[in-house]
Image (cartoon, helix red, strand yellow):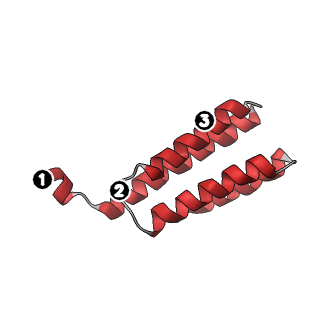
Amino acid sequence: TLIEKNRNMEAQAKADVAISTRSVERAMQALDEGNQTAAAKAMQEAEAAVSSSPASGAAITDQRARIEQYQSILKDEKDSRKAKKSIQYDNYKTQKKK
């Protein structure tokens, strides 16, 4: 279709990464509230935002890798506050890269 032909994939990638970073923020908020289930769901939404993106490239690949790393940190880290701070800082840096 005409829309698909004129779609700016760089802008699409940035938008999908932004959606993903907001989902990561929701996951961190859920952790603050002690809701592990909601945090896991928000991380899955973050992953879905980049996995289902029609765009490709470094931004999408990097964000997908970061989310996998975040999920691993949350699963393995004994100190959830330390894990949360690490993820929040990295997520913040990603948002400011725009």
Q: Nearer the viewer, mark 3 or mark 2?
A: 3
Q: Which mark is residue 41?
A: 3
Residue annotated with mark 1: 2
The answer to whether 41 appears left or right of 89 in the picture is: left
Residues at marks 2 and 1 touching, judged by CB atoms closer than 8 Å = no
Q: Amino acid at mark 3?
A: Lys
Q: Is residue 61 above or below residue 29?
A: below
Distance in Å between CA atoms under marks 1 and 3 = 35 Å
Is residue 17 left or right of 32 when viewed as pictured? left
Residue 92 occupies which quadrant of the picture?
bottom right
Q: In terms of sequence position, does the residue under pointer 1 or pointer 3 come before the other?
A: 1
- Give percent across and percent down for residue 20: 51, 49
First in sequence: mark 3 vs mark 2: 2
Label 2: how many residues lie within 10 Å, few (<14), some (14-19) or many (20+)? some
Residue tagged by mark 2?
12
Residue lying at 67% horizontally and 37% vertically, measured from the top left: 39
- Near-viewer residue (17 or 1): 1
Q: Secondary structure at mark 2?
A: helix
Q: Amino acid at mark 2?
A: Gln
The percent position of residue 42, horizontal first and vertical second, equals 59, 38
Q: Secondary structure beneath disc 1?
A: helix
